[in-house]
Image: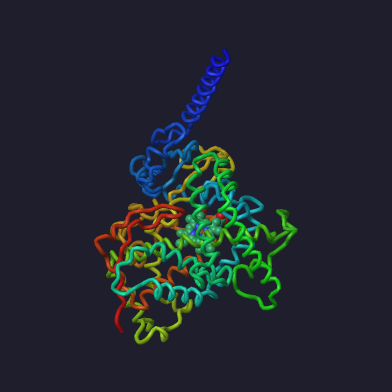
Amino acid sequence: MTLILFTSLLCLVLILIYIYFKRRYTLINNNLPGDKPQIFFGNLLNSGFLTRKKSFHEILHDYQRRYGDKFTFWFGLQPYIVFCLPEHIQTILSDRHTFEQSSSFIPNFDLVCPNGIVVLAGAKWKRHVRVMLPVFKRAKMIQHLDTITECADHFIDQCLLDNHIHTDLVHRCQTFTMNVIGLIAFDYNLESNINSPIKIAFQDFVSYVTIVILMSWLPQWISKIYLKFNWKYQKIHRLIRELTEKIVEQEQNNSQRSKNLIASLVSSLNEQANDEQISSGLTRIEMLDEILTSMLAGYETTSTALAWFIFYMSKYPHVQQRIKQELHEHNLLMTNHVQYLPRLTSEKLDSLIYCECVTKEVLRLAPTATATTRIALRDTIVDNVPIHRGQTVIIGLNNVNTDARYWHDGHPNKFIPERFLGKDKDHHPFAMLPFGGGHRACIGQDLAWLELKLVIVRLMQRGITFEDTIENGGGYQEQLTCFPKNIAVRVHIDKI
Ligand code: HEM
């Protein structure tokens, strides 16, 4: 009797769950096209996302080809409206009163950095951005040019062997950006000891962040439990925090102001900080989260762009020649010995117009950040699509970067830096969005820009040439960003 009762109850619960999901998946009211969602998985299985057959950037391009510039994509249980046309994106990104950054931009990030600017909104975001934005402004970043140059030299000396095929360059590029961000943030040389516990802790921390982001289609409590009971994660989290705290204390007791990120933030420490107008600054806990956020944000993004640069150079050798020609015209090419290389100042970097175009072309073409998101703060309509309060929209950043209707100089998927001097010079402002746009645009873009341009210049200045090989197949591998899957380039170092 009890067994029959229990079985009937179980069946009833299962039927109710089925009806709940069925209703959920049919109650989408915007009439936008898209693949039929599967129960529980939405479009994650049938698009190839969960099986890792396709990267998210390939999926968005594929959907745009099949369904047009706006469509629905089900991320598990959640339906998102995707916009891929620059005009629609301009409407969304420019309206800060209607659209705010959504927690889905870096899902589950609030579990690892609950006070990081990326996951904040409203008054708290405003208070944080008032502190963080000036810290990453170009004028501040220029102070670090010599540091970035030293890291670039270290990268060249340690990683690039003459006449050798390199297959580990994604990892090497990551080490380069990790060193840069370690020095800029902490004055801490993460490379000083190959087994540095903080370096290993940071790399492990990034792996955990990647795992919980990839778990984002599951209910959040699963990721919460996963992190809470993962002793290794707890240990590295503690280690990074303790080290950061120590550096903060040293900085507070330091009579000479350093120029690192922590020093800039220490001056904004305010334990009474809250979201009232009168109280500004960051509390200690908030500051630690911001340091961690900056390190994470600055690590994989720029290294991915650098890895794509190396890949493109191997496929477009004439671009390398043209960069070297420009450096030669500015007397910046290595002519004698490394130690006599001219110092790279911001004025010198600014004068290199072709190198600027190459940096732009890398950022246009590389699918570093595939998409961003916005949540509607009130009911609205974009191009006849009703968007309800609380609905999240996805903006196909990489779709606009290669849209043939907006890029006219040669094929939009081809690497043509000259386009920025020719037909595409005055491109639509929302047809190239590597750093997003509007009030939630990337706050680290000045640093990313300088770092990328400088390392490109330095590589060419030091006479490096990247050559294509049969194994250099490209493709996409997605973690936090999307980097080249198969990279195998032969390095040549020009003889002087
Ligand atoms: C090539 C390198 C980089 C790329 C492609 C990139 C891309 C992006 C994108 C697309 C966004 C979202 C913008 C939006 O929603 O409109 C973003 C946000 C952000 N980025 Fe970057 N980024 C890069 C480097 C960096 C660096 C070096 C840092 C800092 C050290 C950084 C810090 C941030 C932060 C803190 C946000 C969140 C801003 C907010 O929510 O208000 N990024 N980035």
Task: Tell which of 72 and 266 is nearer to you.
Answer: 266
Quadrant where the image shows the C terminus: bottom left
Task: Tell which of 454 and 283 is nearer to you.
Answer: 283
The colour scheme of the drawn protein is rainbow
Q: Which residue is found at the position 56% from the left and 72% from the top?
A: 139
Left or right, residue 148 beside residue 245: left
Quadrant where the image shows the N terminus: top right
Q: Is residue 136 above or below residue 441?
A: below
Residue 401, position as x, y percentages in the image? 39, 55
Q: How many marks?
A: 0
Q: Which residue is found at the position 49% from the left and 54% from the top?
A: 207
Residue 441, position as x, y percentages in the image? 52, 57
Q: Is residue 155 above or below residue 227?
A: below
Residue 489, position as x, y percentages in the image? 30, 66
Q: Is residue 381 in view? A: yes
Q: Is residue 422 in view? A: no
Task: Tell which of 43 and 322 is nearer to you.
Answer: 43
* Outermost residue, left side: 470
* Outermost residue, top side: 1
Quadrant assignment, res 363? bottom left
Q: Which residue is found at the position 52% from the left and 42% from the top?
A: 392
Residue 271, position as x, y percentages in the image? 73, 60
